[in-house]
Image (cartoon, rainbow, N blue to C red):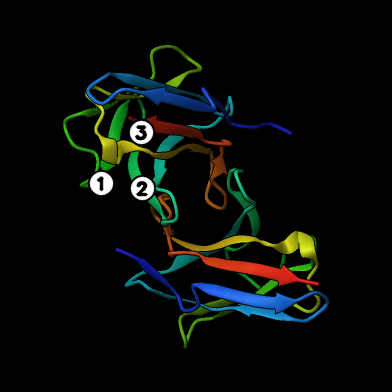
Amino acid sequence: EPEVTQTPSHQVTQMGQEVILRCVPISNHLYFYWYRQILGQKVEFLVSFYNNEISEKSEIFDDQFSVERPDGSNFTLKIRSTKLEDSAMYFCASIAAPGELFFGEGSRLTVL
Amino acid sequence: AQSVTQLDSQVPVFEEAPVELRCNYSSSVSVYLFWYVQYPNQGLQLLLKYLSGSTLVKGINGFEAEFNKSQTSFHLRKPSVHISDTAEYFCAVSDRNDYKLSFGAGTTVTVRA
């Protein structure tokens, strides 16, 4: 069964450092997403990406965040200067048609 | 925009007892509805979805949910739970014209022997 893969599974970083979280969406999917889940809280939408550009972003997705699809397979989320409150599980997802977002297993980011 | 309210933050239940997790949504347009499960330290797994057709939807692991348009609800049920059903359950909604999901706050189900 096709799946969305994310790396790293866990990253620990110092406050102020740049972090890149990587995702490989399912190959024939066209819409890509990043979601965030702070520990013990609900899953929150960050950004959607279609046709090589951001289609929608939430108010959480400020200037320190960026997304990129550098090649035909990877989809990355960059946090330029991490803050303590960026500590969370970050989920990548992709979809080809209405009905189901396929989520990756998540990347846990810990900012010290 | 859509929003989702999960009415119970924690649901303790004994093994082999039934469970119902309540979910209400608000939206000005037609929606798709989903339930996801998250086991400890794992990702999100789709339990079931409502896209159209029959309002009673059956999913994996013996779960089912019923879409009630008049009450804007999509409650999740299982007639007999197992210890392994201990997890966080999230209700989610998306606009039919936009695949983005909006999640509820989650319900923690703890199954005890």
Q: Is residue A49 above or below residue A73?
A: below
Residue type beneath disc 1: Ser
Between B35 and B110, the one nearer to me in the picture = B110
Where does label 2 land, which residue?
A: A45
Distance between mark 2 and mark 3 Cα atoms: 12 Å
Residue type beneath disc 2: Phe
Disc 3: CA contacts within 10 A as few (<14), some (14-19) or many (>=20) = many
Count every numbered label the image shows and give the total: 3
Residue type beneath disc 3: Phe
Q: Is residue B29 left or right of residue A104?
A: left
Q: Chain of mark 3?
A: A
Front of the two marks 2 and 3: 2
Where does label 1 land, which residue?
A: A58
Asked whether the beta carbons under mark 2 and mark 1 sit within 8 Å of each other, the answer is yes
Labels 3, 1: one chain? yes
Looking at the image, the residue that sits furthest to the left is: A63
Residue B112, numbered circle: none
Distance between mark 3 and mark 1 Cα atoms: 12 Å
User: Which structural element holds mark 2?
Assistant: strand
Q: In the rendering, at what x and y percent does residue A64 appear?
A: 20, 29
* First along the sequence among labels 3 and 1: 3
Distance between mark 2 and mark 1 Cα atoms: 7 Å
Q: Is residue B56 left or right of residue B95?
A: right
Where does label 3 land, which residue?
A: A49
Q: Quadrant of residue A21?
A: top left
Q: Quadrant of the C terminus of chain A?
A: top left
- Look at 40% across and 50% down and name the residue there: B100
Q: Chain of mark 2?
A: A
User: Which structural element holds mark 1?
Assistant: loop
